[in-house]
Amino acid sequence: METDDFEKMVEEIASKSGRSREEVMERVWKTKEKVGLINLRAAAVLVGRELGVTFDFPEVAPRGPMKIGDLLPGMSRVEV
């Protein structure tokens, strides 16, 4: 599912910035290599910002008990 999110992000960056998908992907990989310890999704966010594209991410969940259905891909330090 995270791959699908990443692909959607790349398509959105390409569409909104007027760049080709290939150019966006190249910039994402270069950013990932330059910055280091980040995943492709984080690199895509940085590239998007450079090109004037922002993403609306869901608000951070409040601390405390959550329903399993409220968990989102990429959440970390979640205990079940």
Image (cartoon, rainbow, N blue to C red):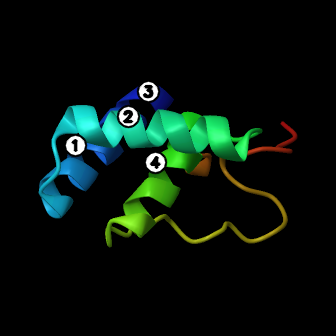
Look at 84% across and 64% down and name the residue there.
Answer: 64
Residue type at mark 4: give it: Ala
Residue type at mark 1: give it: Glu
Q: Would you place residue 38 above or below residue 15 in this image?
A: above
**Labels 4, 2: front one:** 2
Q: Which residue in the protein does label 3 denote? A: 3
Percent x, y of residue 80 = 84, 36
> Dot 2, how many residues are within 10 Å of its Cα: few (below 14), some (14-19), or many (20+)?
few
Cα gap from disc 1 to disc 3, whole angstroms: 12 Å
The answer to whether residue 16 is left or right of residue 36 is left
Look at 20% across and 49% down and name the residue there.
Answer: 14
Residue 26 is tagged as 2
Residue 44 is tagged as 4
Residue type at mark 3: give it: Thr
Q: Quadrant of residue 23?
A: top left
Give the mark, 1 or 2, whose residue is nearer the N terminus. Answer: 1
Residue type at mark 2: give it: Glu
Residue 74 is tagged as none
* Secondary structure type for disc 1: helix
**Labels 1, 2: front one:** 2
Cα gap from disc 4 to disc 2, whole angstroms: 10 Å
Give the mark, 4 or 2, whose residue is nearer the N terminus. Answer: 2
Q: Which residue in the protein does label 1 denote? A: 11
Q: Would you place residue 4 above or below residue 49 in this image?
A: above
* Secondary structure type for disc 3: helix
Cα gap from disc 1 to disc 2, whole angstroms: 13 Å
Mark 3 touches mark 2? (CB < 8 Å): no
